[in-house]
Image (tube, helix red, strand yellow):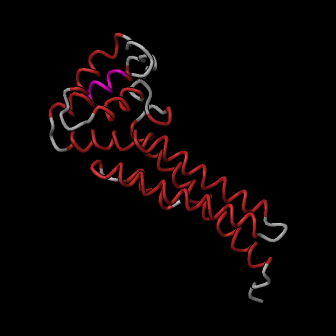
């Protein structure tokens, strides 16, 4: 669980290395989970399955959402740093959302006409790589979490991560409690 947080918080320069580290941790978890299923005493199947679902949900969520969040953070940082192209890009993204442009992804054909300004603006930001531009365009028309305000989007993403962390902590504690009961090591 802790490893998935790296996908959200990694620096742009280390994203690939940190993604590889997270993949290694995930692989190790899968192996340990399989060992636990084989060695667990009867009655622990549900607790192990719940732990697996929580970790898998966090991992899948981070793999899907973290790259876009990092791209948004990079654009925000460049904009706060005074980069004129980044400022223009953020303004163009805001206008695109305001006009209610249709959803579009660079992977699915030619862009609707409403995207022309955003595409030009994002491509003019020299410190954004092509992957970041693609991710920003794919989420351009609808803010993250399908909410209206940027503040709510940040809060929504933070709430989702907090909920996943809490679910992990709960599942982990349930697993520890079940293991202690199965091994008769509970403190009286």
Q: Which quarter shows the C terminus?
A: bottom right
Residue at 15% x, 33% y is 84
Residue 169 position within the rendered picture, expressed as x and y whole percent measured from the top left? 60, 65
Q: Main secondary structure of the magenta part?
A: helix
Check the image and report above or below for 3 versus 60: below
Q: Is residue 95 magenta?
A: yes
Residue 163 position within the rendered picture, expressed as x and y whole percent measured from the top left? 57, 53
Residue 39 position within the rendered picture, expressed as x and y whole percent measured from the top left? 75, 70
Residue at 46% x, 20% y is 103
Residue 8 versus residue 109: which sits nearer the camera? 109
Residue 173 position within the rendered picture, expressed as x and y whole percent measured from the top left? 66, 70
Marks counted in the figure total: 0
Residue at 27% x, 50% y is 13
Q: Is residue 40 magenta?
A: no
Image check: 56 left or right of 175? left
- Outermost residue toward the bottom? 188
Q: Quadrant of residue 48?
A: bottom right
Image check: 166 left or right of 37? left
Q: Quadrant of residue 114?
A: top left
Residue 98 versus residue 35: which sits nearer the camera? 35
Image check: 171 left or right of 147? right
- Outermost residue toward the right? 42
Check the image and report above or below for 134 versus 18: above
Residue 17 versus residue 104: which sits nearer the camera? 17
Q: Which residues are magenta?
A: 91-96
Check the image and report above or below for 74 versus 176: above
- Outermost residue toward the top? 113
Check the image and report above or below for 127 versus 159: above
């Amino acid at each position: 669980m802790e490893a998935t947080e790296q996908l959200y918080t990694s620096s742009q320069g280390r994203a690939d290395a940190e993604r590889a580290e997270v993949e290694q941790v995930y692989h190790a978890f899968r192996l340990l989970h399989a060992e636990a299923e084989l060695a667990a005493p009867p009655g622990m199947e549900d607790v192990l399955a719940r732990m697996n679902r929580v970790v898998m949900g966090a991992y899948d969520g981070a793999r899907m959402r973290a790259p876009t969040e990092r791209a948004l953070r990079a654009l925000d940082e460049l904009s706060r740093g005074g980069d004129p192209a980044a400022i223009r890009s953020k303004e163009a993204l805001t206008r695109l959302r305001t006009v209610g442009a249709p959803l579009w992804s660079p992977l699915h054909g030619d862009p609707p006409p409403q995207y022309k300004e955003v595409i030009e603006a994002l491509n003019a930001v020299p410190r954004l790589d092509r992957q970041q531009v693609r991710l920003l365009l794919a989420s351009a028309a609808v803010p993250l979490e399908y909410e209206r305000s940027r503040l709510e989007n940040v809060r929504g993403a933070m709430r989702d991560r907090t909920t996943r962390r809490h679910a992990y902590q709960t599942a982990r504690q349930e697993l520890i409690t079940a293991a202690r009961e199965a091994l008769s090591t509970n403190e009286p």
